[in-house]
Amino acid sequence: MNDDERVPDGQPIPGWAALVPIVALVGFLSLFILVLPGRYPGFEGTGHLPLILAAVTGGIVARAYGWSWKTLQHGIDKAIGMAMSAMLILLVIGLLMGTWLVSGVVPALVDWGLSLLSPSFFLPTACAVCSVVSLVSGSSWSTAGTVGIAMIGIGGALGIDPAMTAGAVISGAYFGDKLSPMSDTTNLAPAMAGAELFEHIRHQMLTTGPSWVIAMIVYTVLSLGTDVTVDSNEVEAIQAAIRQGYAPGLVHVIPPAVVLLFVLRRMPALPTLLLGAGLGAVLALGQGTGADAVITSALSGHAAQTGNAGVDDLLSRGGMLEMSSTVILILCAMSFGGVMERTGMLQTLANTLLRLAKSTGSLIAVTVLTAAGINVVSGDQYISIVVPGRMYGTAFAERGLHPKNLSRALEDGGTITSALIPWNTCGAFMSATLMVSTGAYLPYAVLNYVNPLLSILFGFLGITIAKRQSVAP
């Protein structure tokens, strides 16, 4: 019998006890992020210690009900294993950012973007471009790590608040991620619910499409209403500094073009991004950049020296080591989520919530909120889809609801909200990649919070809710 098949060695944990680690997490987060920074100037609150302390609390509760340390460690190891590919991709994105900066790829994209994009329509344009790229690639992470980085640079040079740009990038990235047949979560949700893939995608469009339209309207209003005065002389100075320091040319199109080609051919994300980072390094070396500078940029980040302070600040970032804090945050989150999942505390809480589902609308709402809540508790979007997918399938079937209602609710609550949680793998990735805190971009990630609200509203109104018997086999 392998570890996954091992019979749990503890007693069932009741709902009130399963809630203790959640309350502890909320309390520790409030203390470290809201209270202590206000009392101690210079103290920078993060979610690292709160997550570890909450995991310890969960372990104490589990031990009180007879769960062994071996079982708890297995849960932690399994959860970390689930997030391992995400952490590796995060580190590779750091490498890619460093080599694309030192080789001039990102500076070239910024230079060209400044010539093409207007502040008046920048936010909707950024959202639309990221929507298309993510739709064809199936990856919100690859979209944010390539096109998103360029949009942040262009927006900064145009005087757009980076939080607004990050929100537009994330909204577009997750629109495509939810609807692309190449997305892992788009395949996982119907698999958990028992729905067919393309049936699931079409049903998702009924909530995601209107949410995207609302987001585009908001971004258009924000762009038109934002008091951004772009000094043409300042833009020309930025472009002049970039052109003098990096000499943008067609050769700088090669790395992103190759990455995009491999993404479109559905190649795995990790080797594709590694190839992109390698091409950036080769390009930098071919342009006469020293090997020491390339290695330093890849590991610790690029330090721009154009003579223009604004450009230097814009282009000084990246590097694998700069991602280490985010990787550690994910490890902490997975430790907490692993304890909660392995001991059945997540399942207990989900069962308790199911008692509130007295109608179709409340069942949809409970499913969406459970998926979003597990994103907070477990720190991983895959768990937020798998656990409620297992728990609520029978309830949907008993009400005569088509399984595509469940698969849509899983994504409307799980996939879409993951980027809004700072310690979730997705939130941590987006924040580290776009260099904007989750709290800062959250108000502008319009699609990501409108979508679950619209899904719940449609559930209560009975809009687009499909009955099992009404659908042809």
Image: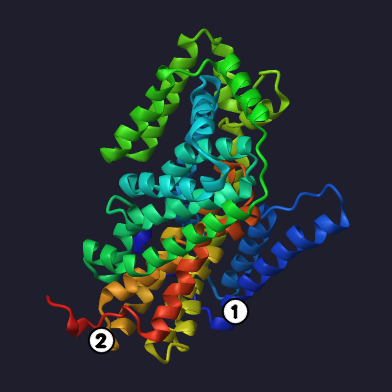
Q: Do the residues labelled 2 and 1 touch (CB within 8 Å)?
A: no
Residue 331 seen: no
Q: Position of residue 330 (x, y in %)?
A: 55, 50
Relative side of 387 to 158, left or right: left
Q: What residue did someone put label 2 on?
A: 400
Residue closest to the eye, 89 or 144: 144
Relative side of 165 to 263, left or right: right
Mark 2 or mark 1, earlier in chain? 1
Q: Position of residue 193 (x, y in %)?
A: 29, 71
Q: Position of residue 315 (x, y in %)?
A: 61, 28
Residue 246 seen: yes
Q: Distance between the residues labelled 2 and 1?
A: 33 Å
Q: What residue did someone put label 1 on?
A: 17
Q: Give the residue at the far left of this rendering.
A: 473
Relative side of 245 to 462, left or right: right
**At x 45% / y 82%, what residue is drawn?**
351
Relative side of 121 to 30, left or right: left
Specify the amino acid type for callout 1. Ala
